[in-house]
Amino acid sequence: MGEHSTWWDFLNGFEGWRNLTAMLEHQLGRGAGTARPWTFVMLTDTHFSLAHVLSSILVALFLVFGAFVYKGAVAGGGDKALIPPRGFTVRNVFEMMCEGILSTMEGVMGRKNAVKYLPFVGAFAFFIFFNNLLGLIPGFAPPTDTLKTNLALSVLVFVATHYLGVREHGLKYFRHFLGPVLWLSPLMLPIELVSHFARPLSLSMRLMGNMVADHKVVATFTMLVPILVPVPFMLLGLLVVIVQTLVFCLLTMVYISMAVAHEEHH
């Protein structure tokens, strides 16, 4: 299996799947014979693939499954449900991650905002972490090593940040784009606009660059010497998975905290 090959490639043996891929490739203008063939951000040609979409769906299904397992473990258990089970279970993993996310958010946003925005930031943390982690499994590519996946997540953060800011402060939220004093507004407005619109690109490129590099290193050593040698690089990759999830979510917390902070708009 090559560096860019995945288990999803076996679906190409089914005619229905090939027809679906060809139809989407044509509709999205990704084919070589289209009027505007797709060129990657690094100005090199790419091939059309749904592998990252399927991997994202797989991660989403796993998270839904884990959520129902957790709900079933605590529902109707009474006081006994407060005691976590022994061993390494899905419930323990989900609880440990939630506690870690909430603790980090409290340090950045305060207790009130941490509890309020935990579902939003927590959803990003779970989705990005398990998408990143998928790249350490031979035969899978992390969906987060593509710009389209990361840009979708980043744009959602961008839209949510300004929506929450407007909901918290009304139209006065946009006053901070003009700077602390009115006479600085011609200078501050372009700077603030560039700064805010650069956020989605920054979040996307940072996550993509690190996951591409990590996946390439692990895949290369797995192909060269598939026994034992890739293990240290997988452990290093696990650290990259955790750090990149943390960086994306930390920046999301900071952006939301800045948008809803009252002292910024007095």
Image: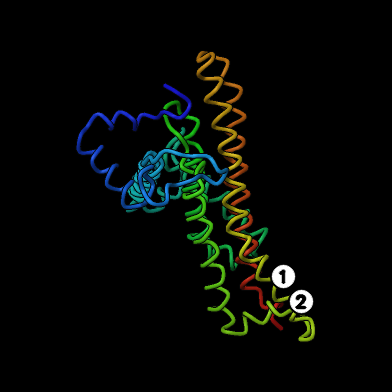
**For residue 5, above or below residue 76:** above
- Residue 43: image x %, image y %? 55, 43
* Local crowd size for mark 2, using a 10 Å CA cut-off: few (<14), some (14–19), many (≥20): few
The answer to which of 147 and 163 lies nearer the viewer is: 147
Q: Residue 121 vs residue 198: left or right?
A: left
Q: Amino acid at mark 2?
A: Leu
State the image quarter where residue 49 is shown. Answer: top left
The answer to which of 45 and 114 lies nearer the viewer is: 45
- Residue 263: image x %, image y %? 71, 77
- Residue 220: image x %, image y %? 55, 22
Can residue 111 be spotted in the picture? Answer: no
Residue ID for mark 2: 187
Residue at image point 59% right, 41% down: 242
**Element at label 1:** helix
Task: Measure the alpha-carbon separation of dots 2 and 1.
Answer: 7 Å
Residue ID for mark 1: 191
